[in-house]
Image (spheres, grey):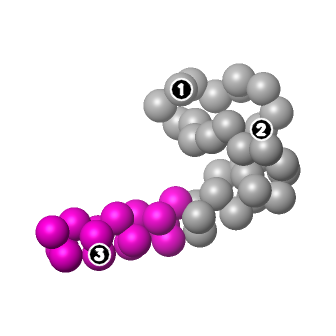
Amino acid sequence: MQVEVGKQALAIYRIGPFHTRVEAEHALETLRARSEEWFKEDQED
């Protein structure tokens, strides 16, 4: 649950890459919002 620079953790524990540290710090919020959008789109289909 921390921002890393470079490949420190195993790939299964990483998300990204992100362009900035701020984007990485808010990654979980961004992913949650995108997942909700995709779920809504799937429900519409």
Q: Vertically, is 31 above or below 16?
A: below
Q: Which mark is residue 43?
A: none
For badge 3, the amino acid type reads: Lys
Which residue is the extreme one toward the front? 45
Q: Would you say the magenta stretch is mainly helix, strand or loop?
A: helix
Q: Which mark is residue 11?
A: 1
> Tag 2's secondary structure?
loop
Q: Read off the residue under disc 3.
A: 40
Q: Residue at x 53, y 26 (%)?
A: 11
Sort mark 1 into few (<14), some (14-19) or many (20+) by Cα contacts within 10 Å. Answer: few
- Tell me how far mark 1 sits from mark 3, CA to CA: 28 Å
Q: Vertically, is 45 above or below 15?
A: below
Left or right: residue 42 versus residue 29 is left
For badge 1, the amino acid type reads: Ala
Q: Read off the residue under disc 2.
A: 4
- Tell me how far mark 1 sits from mark 2, CA to CA: 12 Å
> Tag 1's secondary structure?
helix
Q: Residue at x 83, y 58 (%)?
A: 22
Counting residues from the start of the chain, the first of labels 1 and 3 encountered is 1
Of marks 1 and 3, the one in the foreground? 3
Q: Position of residue 33 (x, y in %)?
A: 50, 71
For badge 2, the amino acid type reads: Glu
Q: Is residue 34 magenta?
A: yes
Of marks 3 and 2, the one in the foreground? 3
Camera-side residue of 42 and 10: 42
> Tag 3's secondary structure?
helix
> Magenta residues, as a range?
31-45
Sort mark 2 into few (<14), some (14-19) or many (20+) by Cα contacts within 10 Å. Answer: few
Left or right: residue 20 versus residue 15 is right
